[in-house]
Image (cartoon, helix red, strand yellow):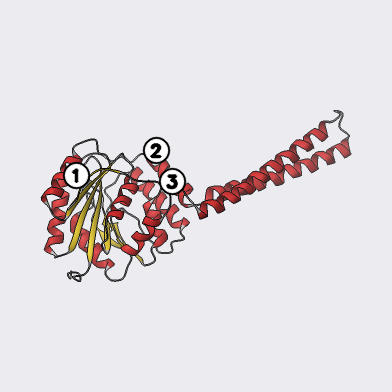
Amino acid sequence: MNELKPNSSLSIVIPVYNSEKILAKIVKEILDICRSRHYNFEVILVDDSSQDGSWQKAKELAKCFEEVKAHRLARNYGQSLANLWGFKQSKNDYIITMDDDGQNPPSEIPKLFEKAEEGHDLVIGKPISKQHGLLRNLGSRLVTNIAKSIYKTKEPLILSNYRCIHKSVIEKICNERNANPYLPALILKYSTQRTNINVSHKKRRSGQSNYSLLKLASLVANLLFGHSVLPLRIAIAVGFTFSLLTALVGVALVAHYLINQSNVPGWTSVMVFMAGFCSIVVLILSTIGEYIIRILQEVTGSRAIYTREEVLK
């Protein structure tokens, strides 16, 4: 591979959570790779309030190596917001995101970086062979398909956390006002020149995955309610359907009364009134739902992220 242009700069953002045993090895591998290719780079470690000694390890690395910066979030915000904090600290031309579990080998960084230099604003590492469990693979596929459907992505992309993103996309993501950002969806939303590149994927070097059915359900809910109006559209469709059905029920009850003459005085009028009332209520709620859609499209709440401690140069 050719070395990059001297003016190209790179930030490598790593959300850190309970990876005390392997963090130093991963960072040193990154330093060796990037230094050997004379990259203008930095490594941004964002500790998401780890419960082990990860923060102490991150501080030591930041003090020992000029290229490393360490930030500790005030509480556990989750991977997306940890990445977002790292985005906001970087001013470089490209950002690579990678996991802290050793499954994204640093040796693949040049592939992502140099492919992006060809003119892509998003290069996603496509694992040649995933070393995840069945649940994780199925969940990833489900979330990927939902995200691609929401943003009408035509490319046959495979999404992963190992990716290289141009600063023009990063700036738009940082300006996004969303209370629960889901980065893979936002990256698809703002990128235009997207591609995959094959990368190796290793087994976890330490610890266990935090992925679970609950985590999957949370991701799907966040994606649907935070980045799509599909749930409201479905609710409106159901509302209008029931409105039509209750109106038909009212007509049927009136016809039944006129034909068969109900023996219970007032029964037909009460039922028609209830059907009509329910129809109106559902119709009003559906209309309100449509206005909520418009509001969500204009304004969403922002979530502030705070740090507890930082080690910067």
The residue labelled by disc 2 is 214
SS of the residue at dot 2?
helix
- In the visual, does 279 lie left or right of 99? right
Q: What residue appears at the point 64 percent right and 44 percent down from the top-left corner?
A: 285
From where the camera sits, is residue 295 visible? Answer: yes
Q: Is 134 in front, or is 245? A: 245
> Mark 1 is on which residue type?
Arg
Q: What residue appears at the point 40 percent right and 45 percent down from the top-left corner?
A: 219
Q: Earlier in the sequence, mark 2 or mark 1?
A: 1
Q: Quadrant of residue 154?
A: bottom left
Q: What x and y, as percent, mark residue 292?
A: 57, 49
Q: What x and y, as percent, mark residue 293?
A: 56, 51
> Mark 3 is on which residue type?
Asn
Q: What x and y, as percent, mark residue 255?
A: 84, 41
Image quadrant holding the N terminus, namely bottom left
The residue labelled by disc 1 is 205
The residue labelled by disc 3 is 222
Q: What residue appears at the point 43 percent right and 46 percent down from the top-left corner?
A: 222
Mark 3 vs mark 1: in front = 3
